[in-house]
Amino acid sequence: MLLTCPSCKTKNFLDPYPFWNFKGTTQCAGCKKIWRLETSNGACVSGPAEASGKADLLPGFAETQAYEGISGPGLTRPAPKAQKESICKPKAIKRNVRGNVIAGYPLTKNDLVGSLAKFMVAGAK
Amino acid sequence: MSSAKTIPWPAVPIPTPEEVYAGLSDQAKDYPLYLESICRQSHAFEKPEALARLRVYDTTTRMMIGHWCSSLLAELGAEVIQVEPPGGDPMRKLTPFGRKEYMFTDKESGEPVGAHFLHEMRNKLSVTLNLETEEGREIFKKMAVHTDVIIENDPPGHRDSLGIGYRQLKEINPRLIYCWVGQLGQWGPHKDKPGMLDPTAQAACGFCHGTGDPKEFGGTPMRSALWMCDHVGGTQAAMGILTALYYREVVSGEGQFVEATSAEAVIRILDYSWAWYGMDGSIRPRFGNWDLAINIYAVNPCKDGYMMVGGGHDRLWYRIWRVVGDEYPKVEDDILGDPHLREVADRLAMNQQIKTYTMLGEWLKDNSRSDAERKLSKQQVASGGVLYVNEVAEYPHFKYRGHVAETESPHYGKILYGTTPFQQAKTPGRLKWMGRPTGYDNQDTYRRLLGLTSEDFARLQKANVI
Amino acid sequence: MATDTAVSNAPQISFEEFCRKTFDPKGEFAKPEALKGIRVLSCTQYILGPSCASYLAELGAEVIKIEAPRRGEAMRHTTPFNEPFLYPLSKHVPERGTGLGFVGANCNEYFIAIDFHRPEGQNLVKKLAAKSDVFVENYRPGTFDRWTLGYRQLSAINPRLIYQWLGGFGGWGPGRVRASYDILGQSQGGNFGMTGKAEFMGGSPAKHTIWLADYWGGMMGAVQILAALYYREKISGEGTFMEYSQVHGVTRQLEYALPLYGRHGITRERWGTWDTQLCVHGIIKCGKSSYPNSENPQENEEGYILVSAYSDEDFARLCKTIGDGNFAAKYAKGDDRVKAQAQMEIYPALEKWAADKTKEDVADILDKANINNQPVWNSKEVATNPHWQQRGSVRWIDDPYYGDLLHQGPGYKLSATPPRTKWALKPVGADNEYILGKLAGLSPADIKRLEDQECI
């Protein structure tokens, strides 16, 4: 359910699985106001009404009306990660987990012999 | 289990070809009708069987992997003889929640069998033999002369210690293809222990850890409802057996030893987990019903259940939102206006997926599975609802194609079952019968293979060898 | 035939040693390949079709993967979190890489590119098909037929061709026009709805984390192909057409659900991490993390473990181990403890006992009590586990294009003609010169012209 905060208009994304049949409070990631609401089968059937106390469940993600993302501890729920940091963009990986050479970073045509990276031809370790 | 009165199947008649292809031009009908003419199961018994010359002894018990493997061979025409301990494979007794009333009963003998065992006891004969007795082992050695394949799943080394393992039987029959199946292996620091069963393999191969909701969403590792690793492992075992068969016939004239484990079969198909860890130490997280590598490609709640929508391409992304926009134009506008969702690659981050599926949920909450599928298919987007087994059984497409069928067993009556997916033009898979009481084929099999007499039978049964 | 005496007198190594030697991954390349001389064309994309061909490639078939020129097929652009890629994607596009979604489904193959839409491309495919044994494709039904590359056309050129189509819903029937993905197959085939936390525990259907319907579907396709190769060589001398519907495969796997529904009208429901037919045989939470100080959030999680004590003797011993006298008496019999209510009492009690332990602590205690158990291992624990390393199920390979890669090994072992992993993948069109020169008689000038035109 999309909860547009009645107070600050931040778009709070109450993601489907935990919020599909929900009864309790959540917190606006923009202004931190607590909102009580009830959803049934994905639709809001009660609220949002102003409330106090600690939120039962934080939104999955939020953003401003201008599409600026809001996330972080105490604001939205943490995302599952495969490592300490997740950049979600192509990574330049030159050495693998055991320190050996790997063709894991972008190349140019000058780096190639046919379809093969030159440094691979040399059999570098 | 949710319960309903027994209903005849199908509840709704199966569509006819005339109904299915109504209104189509000859050109549009040409290819599907061509396929029907060569692949429909109704033609299956007119055609030969690929493995008609193959004999297999399935001597596995307590697990599904061996029975699954031998089912595939049996569907393709092999003569599969299930060699069970006297009293039958203990798996016959399994029934959901211990409910005896869910079992099927042999009309002749009154012997009950659980539906789990029954469903895999297809096209197979059953004999009993006690391999824990010396005489039983002597009989087994004599039988080994007459078979192409033996499948077993005893604890590692057990058959070898009894003198009826691969090392011994290959001396008796050099053409023998001997296949051991299990959860983790016959050798290695964690080899199989007696009594191990799926989902041991699921937990050991990384499958469970990666399945289910993320911890951050209150989730835990999850197993497949099915003994899934056994299915995949049994399929790899069949692949190994057929490879050995091909090589024996075409090249070597000799058999070989096949080892297949449930865990390794699934390790083989844990897609990118290993390469990912190897590249930068990433450990694959659970991601619920969404995907680490593709957005939109997920199952989410909808008005009447759960709905799968898929479309990783850019083209499909816009088509999906166009469908949503028909009812929620503001949602489509928001998505199209979002700079963080413009590039395909940018849509993968968790935050972007949360937004994507929250917004899609605004539309899904008002659309049932069939509504959603109908609307999305107009834009050629792949979608469909999560179906429960009662829905699968009645789905027109599956009934028409015979994914689900009913067989009538002289022993057990009418049985609804999942049919063989081996649809072929020349040597299609087929079901001949489902279910076989324990030891039903003792007389026939032992007489024709070993020439046992009535006296032999009496003595052996008394000694609990057969 | 050796006599009993001869066999028993022969010095024998232990069975485990025998297996270790027989199936040693390091010994694979010394042994012949079962499918030497068999040629396979893989006109496939995503996972279902490609994986089918890859299983044949492990057995030594010459598998030629044919993709769209320059950028290749869609799976090359699929990678977890958009992070890891292998470069170059092709010699024309070196700044982009192949995503890891492509890994595992395309090993040991040769990679050429052909634009199927163009007549010149279609003619190239026909030339290759004339010399091939197996043709695997998973495009929408009828597509290859329209391109004059379907079974009807190719079998006229090569009657020995074994043609395998794989796809979601099949090429005939009311749903034949539907596109399909793996999780759509899972959803519609029936295994999705029965997997996951139970309804009464607030759960919902859970997808299998792997592309199960597709990867396992490819295996089923390979099983049919192997049977067809055998049948062709031994009996018929002819090829055949085979159809594999991945949704059909999922429905085949539903175990007792269909017979139960047909006989009693009962719909199999979700039962989470426990088992519907055996107790104790379920996964429980262990309260402590095995790596509390790790920087990787995956390792900070508490542990889970499968506890398997479903025989009466094992259950009694389990109760003794956890210091419970209540259940030992109440649920001594298997039939009693497999009931839903009993399971709802027993597993929480086990989790209470495990709440202050790591999964290794629990495994240790249970091992000593001779109770079967299996810790739920994450992908790193599996990848670094000596058991899988020794057996070659996960192995480091020296890939000629990409370097030191960790890769899945074959999923089964053969003593005389073992499957093996040679390389993971190659850039799009990397083998254009080699394959099209060798099999289609194209000169280097032809190849350059066609590559410039993006025909290959």
Image: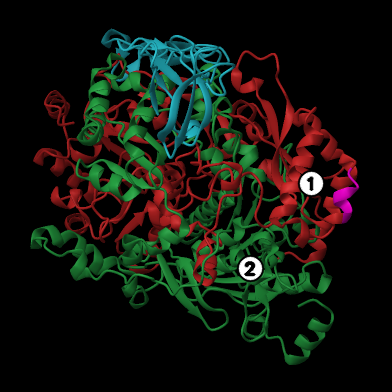
Chain colours: A cyan, B green, C red
Which residue: 68% across, 78% down?
Answer: B111
Could you say where residue B63 lies in the image, as x and y percent from the top left? 66, 57
Q: Is residue B8 magenta?
A: no
Rendered view: B378 above or below B296: below
Rendered view: C254 above or below B16: above
Report the disc number at residue B24: none
Specify the amino acid type for callout 1.
Ser
* Residue furthest to the bottom: B454
Which residue carries the number 2 mark?
A: B114
Instruction: Please give the range of residues in magenta.
Output: C324-329
Which residue: 45% across, 57% down?
Answer: C251
Q: Nearer the viewer, residue B155 or C267?
A: C267
Could you say where residue C380 lies in the image, as x and y percent from the top left? 61, 25
Which residue: 33% across, 11% down?
Answer: A107
In the displayed structure image, the side of residue A120 where residue C415 appears, left or right: right
Which residue: 26% across, 67% down?
Answer: B38
Query: What chain is tagged by disc 1?
Result: C
Report the disc number at residue C14: 1
In the displayed structure image, the side of residue B140 where residue B459 appears, left or right: right
Q: Is residue C327 magenta?
A: yes
Q: Nearer the viewer, mark 1 or mark 2?
A: 2
